[in-house]
Image (tube, rainbow, N blue to C red):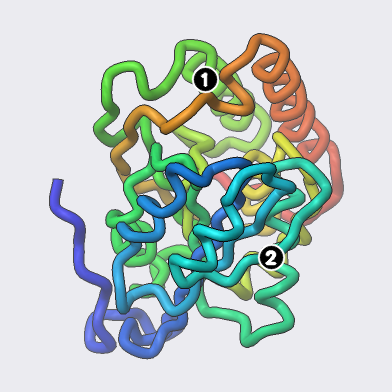
Amino acid sequence: MPVPELATAATAGPAAPAAAAAAIDVVIPALDEERSLPLVLADLPRPAVRRVVVADNGSADGTARVAAAGGAVVVAAPRRGYGSACLAALDYLRHHEPPDVVVFVDADYSDHPEELPRLAAPILAGDADLVIGSRILGRREAGALLPQARAGNLVACALIRLLYGHRYTDLGPFRAVRWQALERLGMADPDFGWTAEMQVKALRRGLRVTEVPVSYRRRLGVSKITGTVAGTLRAGYKILWTVLRHSMGSEGPRGGT
């Protein structure tokens, strides 16, 4: 599936920044990803990406060293947790020339960073505020999405549809969001509930959300979430609780498609 070019000023919607002028920053939460991170950094499309921020989540290996060698800004995020790492990176961006668009991608090389323009295009065209890269709609290498991950994803998406009236196919980590829209969400989850929190809060805040197909391959190394039974159970519980908790809040109108 070809990766689309970023929209030009002539095709972008009136509220969207022109692609040539849009500042797109990439956030990569990382924990002991010394081997895979250089591959992720090398595959990010330039010059589409202005800046890369790697949030080192207390790595014991050379993650921070290879991130800096690859041209990334390295931010320390000592409090363990996927969400904590993302929050640390966003705090850095908030105080250092915030971008127009933020793209989140994992450090384990399971995503295809070269597909970033596919996620950014709907935002730059003025058609979306949040774009989820759906591994379900895209091409997956055999064995890339483990059975426990597929099952948990299916249950969480079904619960979101039931409670919020919106059909997601995935809670995948590869995603793009307009900076001003992201700031409206008040993201806070420090660990496994980060992706679900973003998606349900986007619906509660009335953001324009969409999905695009992305490719997915086997990660390098063992997953820190679905790689163990305990990790899978903890993540599953937190994700479902996050979906339920925000459905009971008074955070504005629910979306629905």
Gap in angstroms between the C-alphas marked 2 and 1: 29 Å
User: Is disc 1 placed on a helix, strand or loop?
Assistant: helix
Q: Is residue 75 above or below residue 200?
A: below
Mark 2 vs 1, N-terminal side: 2
Residue carrying label 2: 75
* Picture coordinates of residue 155, whole percent (x, y): 58, 18
Label 2 crowd bin: few (<14), some (14–19), many (20+), radius 10 Å: some
Q: Residue at x 69, y 19 (%)?
A: 231
Viewer-nearest residue: 247 or 70: 70
User: Is disc 2 placed on a helix, strand or loop?
Assistant: strand
- Cβ–Cβ under 8 Å for marks 2 and 1: no
- Looking at the rendered structure, the kind of residue marked 2 is Val
* Picture coordinates of residue 227, whole percent (x, y): 57, 18
- Looking at the rendered structure, the kind of residue marked 1 is Ala
Q: Residue at x 70, y 29 (%)?
A: 239
Q: Is residue 113 above or below residue 232?
A: below
Residue carrying label 1: 149
Q: Is residue 1 left or right of residue 44?
A: left
Q: Residue at x 62, y 81 (%)?
A: 98
Label 1 crowd bin: few (<14), some (14–19), many (20+), radius 10 Å: some
- How many circles with numbers are drawn on the protein? 2
Q: Residue at x 42, y 32 (%)?
A: 220
Viewer-nearest residue: 52 or 192: 52
